[in-house]
Amino acid sequence: MSPPGRARGEHRPVQHEGASASATMATALLAEALMLAPADIGPQTALGGTPQWDSLAHLRLVLGLEAALGRSLSTDEMLAIADVDSVAALLDGHAADPAQPAG
């Protein structure tokens, strides 16, 4: 269940000192997709190394990213998602180039 005042799927993560906004958002998106607490997401959280990261979790992550970015991901972008850094890189890329065409 979503916290009061927040719709399911709406991401408003608390930004921790020293963490970039994209890293904070990446952590929140992964936590929701993997059904883990944000504190359980870190550099060790990776495709193939995290039991909760199965095909359905990957799909939830793709859908969450698409909602956050406001566009569809290309197949190459979907396949490149492998860890927190790759999710943050997608978010950073969107922030740098908001006119990027949907793939």
Image: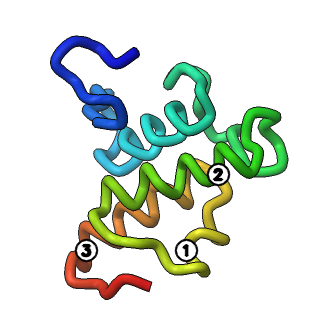
Quadrant housing the N terminus: top left
Left or right of residue 46, residue 95 in this image:
left
Vertically, is 43 above or below 16?
A: below
Of the image marks 2 and 1, the number of the one nearer the N terminus: 2
- Percent of width and height locating residue 48: 83, 49
Q: Which mark is residue 4?
A: none
Neighbours of disc 2 within 10 Å: few (<14), some (14-19), many (20+): many
* Number of the front mark, 2 or 1: 2
- Identified at 67% across, 58% down, the residue is 82
Label 3 amino acid?
Ala
- Between residue 92 and residue 79, name the one nearer to us: 79
Left or right of residue 11, residue 26 in this image:
right
Q: Secondary structure at mark 3?
A: helix
Q: Secondary structure at mark 1?
A: helix
Q: Residue at label 3?
A: 96
Q: Are the two marked residues, 3 and 1, in contact with CB atoms closer than 8 angstroms?
A: no
Label 2 amino acid?
His
Q: Secondary structure at mark 2?
A: helix
* Number of the front mark, 3 or 1: 1
- Identified at 47% across, 38% down, the residue is 27
Quadrant housing the C terminus: bottom left
Q: Residue at label 1?
A: 77
Specify the quadrant of the image occupied by residue 5: top left
Neighbours of disc 3 within 10 Å: few (<14), some (14-19), many (20+): few
The Cα atoms of the two marked residues, 3 and 1, are separated by: 16 Å
Q: Which mark is residue 58?
A: 2
- Between residue 17 and residue 73, name the one nearer to us: 73
Neighbours of disc 1 within 10 Å: few (<14), some (14-19), many (20+): some
Of the image marks 2 and 3, the number of the one nearer the N terminus: 2
- Identified at 54% across, 20% down, the residue is 37
